[in-house]
Image (cartoon, rainbow, N blue to C red):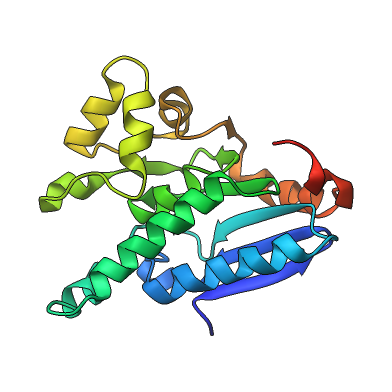
Amino acid sequence: MPDILVERVGTLGRIRLNRPKALNALTHGMVGAIDAALDLFAADEGVAAILLTGEGERGLCAGGDLRSLYESAGSSSAENFWRDEYRLDARIAHYEKPFVAILDGITMGGGVGLSGHAGHRVVTGRSRIAMPETGIGYLPDVGGTWLLPRAPGETGTYLGLTGEPMGAADAIFAGFADACVPAATLPALIDALAALAPEAGHATV
């Protein structure tokens, strides 16, 4: 099975991260596949909105695939990965159609990069969101350093230094999410998005 599943359901363009055994950890190939899917959906007049989800029951995305980055030592693979990932995150932030990300379960590091800049960010009671890179001697990346300073007070400083995970309410308070829905209602939410009128994709987000 491919690491990224791309399909159109009704008027909804779906992008599903498909590495559930690896908590949908992000690889360079996945970044390119998501970018290609965004090209496809942008050109499709029948697509009203985009939805990003993760396969499996554990989370959206645990972050970048550190094993593949480690094994690429001595090459330019890591540099190319982060360059393209940052460009993808920026594209999601300014995407021309409504972009919805469901941060159900574990969403960390690169998962925050993919979802934290979406126009509509949905969390559930199972959400655990964090930028834990400082635990391995790195800085909060994938656009996290844009989100963290915009959190109220010194919340972003605390989250950036400690890598502490946020639940749904904390993520909304800190500006990493917009709305919370019960996990049991996610299928109904997806059905509703798939039933949007095509012209909704031309609305200002």
- Number of numbered discs on residues: 0
Most foreground residue, 127 or 102: 102
- Placement of 137 over or under 182, stated as above or below: below
Q: In the rendering, at what x and y percent does residue 121 appear?
A: 56, 40
Check the picture and name the quadrant holding the C terminus. Answer: top right
Q: For this view, does 132 lie left or right of residue 191?
A: left
Most foreground residue, 72 or 100: 72
The residue located at (54%, 40%) in the rendering is 124
The residue located at (58%, 71%) in the rendering is 36
Most foreground residue, 16 or 203: 203
Q: For this view, does 20 lie left or right of residue 204?
A: left
Q: In the rendering, at what x and y percent does residue 8 appear?
A: 76, 67
Image quadrant of residue 13?
Answer: bottom right
Residue at the bottom extreme? 1
The residue located at (73%, 46%) in the rendering is 189
- Placement of 9 over or under 125, stated as above or below: below
The residue located at (45%, 34%) in the rendering is 176
Image quadrant of residue 12?
Answer: bottom right
Q: Is residue 180 visible?
A: yes
Q: Is residue 59 visible?
A: no
Q: In the rendering, at what x and y percent does residue 98 appear?
A: 69, 45
Residue at the top extreme? 153
- Placement of 110 over or under 41, stated as above or below: above
Q: In the rendering, at what x and y percent does residue 144 appear?
A: 34, 41
Check the picture and name the quadrant holding the N terminus. Answer: bottom right
